[in-house]
Structures are given as structure tokens and as C-alpha cells.
Amino acid sequence: SHHNLYTVLNGAISFWLSAFFIWQLNSIIDFKKSQRIYSSHIAIIVVLVTLIFSWPMLRGNATNANYDFITTAIILILFLKTVQADKQTGSDIFCVEWIIWPVYLFTVRIINYPLLLLSVYGLYFLLKNRAWKKIIVNTVVCLLLVLPFMARNVILTGYPFYPATFGNIFNVDWKADYNIIKKLQDYIKYFNRVNTAFADINQTKKLSTPGWITSWFHYLFRYDKVVVVAALAGYLLNLLSIKRFLAFNNKSTKFLALVFCLQLVSWMWIAPDPRFVNGELLSGIMLLVILLVGNKSYYQGKIKATHFLIALFIGILSYTSFKIIKNENYQRFLLPYKIPQPPIKEVIVDNISLKIPEKIFNNWNPRCYATELPCLYIVNPKLRARGKSIENGFRLEK
């Protein structure tokens, strides 16, 4: 099918995450009896509003095939469940997700490598409790996630952690050209420092460290600026109020916040696009709300707890109806639009036809939107076919 069903998957993720947060608020949505609102409830409401009104998150995710939002969803769920755990249980709140989810997120984007510290923490907890069976099962599951990921990278590029070049132990004749990889790494790094729509990469490269941070923040979208400022304020204020933070939170929350800070430092240096760490940023906003509200509960009347959500849903319904009526692009209820197919030019390599797509929709690079295979973005002059068919694969001349 040429229908863009990947956007349907992302739309489902947006829906599931919204449903999860609403379910979390279920304890204060009761018309019949009075309830108490805790700081975590208020934090959930603030994050839910942020998810809705920051375009790249729920709404933007539901309209594209990008795979970064799955990281946001997993990080938010993991953080919220950890924060809500009973402080008295300490490290006993550990669950299997602390081991498996970070490993999975590493295979989604290797920029998530600091999160592997959570897996180490989880394995340490199991080792401490001599839970040998759980250690074996979780280790096997992690290997089943990582080994296929590495094998795919080696088959495609010759590097197990592409586009990173560490672990370069495979001497295969299809290994990607190092100079091309270096250009890609520079593009990832400097494109995310200042979007090329605002400044050329060569200009961004000339900016000193940490002077480029000013330009980076200046060219962020407004909704990203709000999220970044609020999140960093959350982490910073909790650091300044360290005694209160240590007193109010369980051991796992403390460790989780530390790992998230390490993740943010790594992200800032490697590729500081907010979409890569929206989960950690929204967790910082939760920390900010919890710190400002305090470790207290607030009495709530019978219906008042629902007023916010009712107003929110009416606003969303009105906005959605307006968009559907005014814009025919939103009038697709059963199937999404077909994937656009860009114009292509044909290149022959050893009697095998290769398709090179052109750029469309102001994308920064050409993309194989439902293009007939084999489809490549560029053709290396050293590229040679192994045989007479694409099934035999390709190699690079030395």
C-alpha cells in the first residue's frame, strides 16, 4: 500500500499517551465524592496541557512518521510511575522496565545511551537481591534487542552503532566511507545547533563553544523555548533545593533525575534538537511543579476536579472541528493521504538501475517516499554490484 500508515501508528501513540495521563487523573475525576489532589496530579495536568499545546508533541507526532515520540512516551511513563511510588519502598520500586526500556530506546536512537545507566541500576538491584532467574531473563531480552540492531547496522554500513564509528571491528567490503560518515556526524551536530533554515552549517561551525548556545536558543521555536526554560528551571531549582528534593523523593527518582541530567548534557553537545529529549524535558517540568506545589495534598470539591478537563476537551473539540471544516487536508477519516512520490533520476551501476529521488516539501534531503527500489540518496563513485541482480548486494571499491 502507498498509504502513509506510519502516521496512523504515531497517531495511536499520541492517543495512548493522552489516555494514560487521563487515566492517571481518574482518582480526582469523580462527580459523586470529594477527592484530594496531590502535587503529582497537578504535574500531570501541566504536562498534559504542554503535550497538547506544544505542536511537535501529540499533534505534530500524529501527522508524521518520525520515531522520536515513542522515546518521549516511554520516558514520561517511566518517570511518572517512579515519582508516584511510595517513598518508603526505596529501591524496591524497581520494575523490569528499568532494564529493558532503556535498551530498547538505545536501539531507537543511540543518542539515548546515557539511559543505559538505568539498566545497570536495575541489574545491580537484581544482583543485590540474588534474583538470578530475573537477571538471566532480562539479560537475554536485552541481547535479543541489541544484537539484531547491531547486525542490521553492520549489514547496512559495516559499523555496529552507525552513524557512530566506535566498535569498528568488522572488515567488510561494503563499509560506509568514513569521510561521508564524518560529514553526516557534522550535519547532525551543527544542523541541530542552528537550523539550516536560519543559518548555513558552515556559519554554525564557526560559532565558539559555549557561544553557540545563544544562537541555538534564539532560533528555537516559541513552544520549544517554553518547554526548555521550564524544564531546566525544574532541574536547576531542585538542585538548589537539594535537601528538599532528597527528602521528598524516593531513591529511584533521585537516580532517574541524575541520569536525565546526564542525558541532557550529552544531548546538548551531540544534537540539541528538543524532540530528542522531550521526555526528559517534560519530566523536568514535572519536577518544577512538584517542587513549587510542595509535598502536600489539596481538598477538592465533588465536581471542581473535572472543570479543567471539561474545558480542555471543549477547547480541543472546537479547535479540531474548525480545522476539519476549514482545511480539506484534515477531512480524511478512514485512510491517510497517499505518500507523495518525488521525481527521480535513474543511475545505472553495473547494469543495475538505481533511483535517485529529488527533494520535495522543502526537506533538507531527498527522501524515498514510496519510490521503487533500489532507491538511494547519493551514489558513491566506488559503488559496484556483486552480481547481476540487486539480490547479490553491492560493495565499495578500495
Image (cartoon, rainbow, N blue to C red):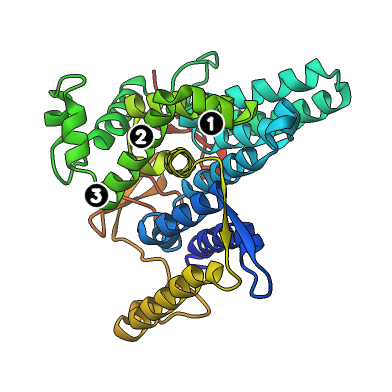
Residue 79's x, y, as percent?
A: 57, 40
Residue 109's x, y, as percent?
A: 49, 35
**Mark closest to the chain's N terminus, 1 or 2:** 1
Q: Mark 1 is on which residue type?
A: Asn
**Mark closest to the chain's N terminus, 1 or 3:** 1
Q: Is 317 in front, or is 287?
A: 287
SS class of the residue under badge 1?
Answer: helix
Q: Which residue is mark 3?
A: 221
At 24% across and 31% down in the image, what residue appears?
190
At 37% across and 23% down in the image, what residue appears?
177
Q: Residues within 10 Å of mark 2 (few under 14, many from 20)?
A: many
The total of numbered circles placed on residues is: 3
Q: Mark 3 is on which residue type?
A: Phe
Q: Which residue is mark 1?
A: 153
Pointers 1 and 3 in contact (C-beta within 8 Å) = no
**Mark closest to the chain's N terminus, 3 or 2:** 3
Q: CA distance from mark 1 to mark 3?
A: 33 Å
SS class of the residue under badge 2?
Answer: helix
Q: Which residue is mark 2?
A: 232
**Residue situated furthest bottom in the rendering:** 325
Q: Mark 2 is on which residue type?
A: Leu
Q: Residues within 10 Å of mark 1 (few under 14, many from 20)?
A: some
Q: Nearer the viewer, mark 1 or mark 3?
A: 3
Residue 161 higher or lower than 321, as above or below: above
Residue 5 higher or lower than 226, as above or below: below
Which quadrant would residue 369 be assigned to in this image? bottom left
Residue 326's x, y, as percent?
A: 29, 84
Residue 146's x, y, as percent?
A: 64, 30
Q: Residues within 10 Å of mark 3 (few under 14, many from 20)?
A: few
